[in-house]
Amino acid sequence: MAIKTKNNELLNLCPECGGSIIPLISTGDVVCNQCGLVIDEKNVDFSHNGRRAYTNQEKISREQTGAPISILLPDMGLSTVIDKSKIINPDLKRAAKWNTRITWQKRNLLIASTELKRISTILNLPNYVKEDAMRLYIEAFKKKLLRGRSINAMVAACLYLACRRKKLPRTLQEILNEAAVNSKDVRRSYAILIRELKLNPPSTNPVSLIPKYMTDLGLNSEIEQLTTKILNAYRSKFSISGKDPKGLCAGAIYLACKLKNKEVTQQQIVQAIGVTEVTLRSRYKELKNKLKISIPV
């Protein structure tokens, strides 16, 4: 490797001892072979740019970066795995064996991240929701909120809280259907997260849930627009705090079907949305009376 002097003369010698200099491709440094002086550092290697790989070995040999850093990995993807197959020294082999054993903290995060990615894949949740849920879980783990609580229950609670914070239309029941844990434990974990982390997530907008239910019920766009109009009119005049958004959706859909003479039974709506018939009738009467809507005979 040649270096330039003040007179733009090219030299292959160390400026300190006059020894030969060598490049370290793995670190991007240029050092003296004799005294170890670092002459240059963090050089960018452009030697592989534009070269195509036709086999798996060529692809591996030309890779210059590792996997991206992700909070969804228990160690952020920064850990080192030692290959024990090429170690001959028994002491080093024993050290490599102990290096593969993870602490209970990492094991906890590994179980949590695996369960989080499983539920997220089934529900088709975007990455920004998964990452926010993992940050909530790590914060809960650091505050020791998992003592005496299920890992799976806390993961489900973090996912639901992340969906609400990111305003993604997902109900708690959808997450409970995929989580392998008791619903009571998830609700308790969710309450603990809200209280201990001092969070105030926005309430779920029932209007955002309408397109999904329309698809499940096989209703047309006319019913969807009328249902949206009914809910927006109700939200603009009355508070929906403390009311289940699914119940409001069920009542609004049933009311819209009545106005348009669409033959949809209460049982069909109840099964598609996941509420009781009592809730549906209560929200239906509440919407009709407060908005003063008359049903044509």
Image (cartoon, rainbow, N blue to C red):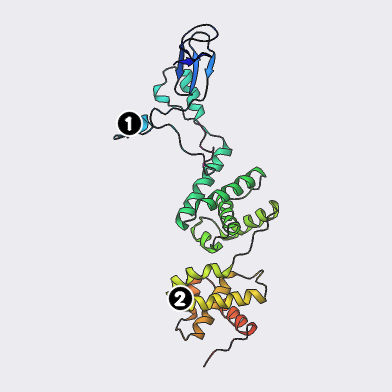
Which class describes the residues within 10 Å of circle 1: few (<14), some (14-19), or many (20+)?
Answer: few
Point out residue 85 in the picture as x, y percentages from the top left corner.
39, 24
Magenta segment boundaries in residue numbering: 73-79
Question: 276 and 260: which one is in front?
Answer: 260
Q: Residue at x 68, y 58 (%)?
A: 200
Label 1 to label 2, Cα distance in Å? 53 Å
- Marks 2 and 1: in contact by CB < 8 Å? no
Which class describes the residues within 10 Å of circle 2: few (<14), some (14-19), or many (20+)?
Answer: few
**Helix, strand or loop for disc 1:** helix
Q: Residue furthest left?
A: 54
**Helix, strand or loop for disc 2:** helix
Residue 231 position (above or below residue 23) = below
The three-letter amino acid code for the residue at tag 2 is Ser
Picture disc at residue 32: none
Q: Looking at the image, is mark 1 or mark 2 earlier in the sequence?
A: 1
- Tell me the chief SS of the magenta region: loop
Q: Residue at x 49, y 49 (%)?
A: 117
| Left or right relative to 36: residue 140 | right
**Quarter in which the N terminus is drawn:** top left
| Left or right relative to 49: residue 108 | right
- Say if the magenta span includes residue 76: yes
Does the image show residue 276?
no
The three-letter amino acid code for the residue at tag 1 is Glu
Picture disc at residue 221: 2
Residue with the mark numbered 1: 58
Point out residue 176 in the picture as x, y percentages from the top left corner.
53, 60
| Left or right relative to 244: residue 273 | left
Does the image show residue 28?
yes
Question: 121 and 98: which one is in front?
Answer: 121
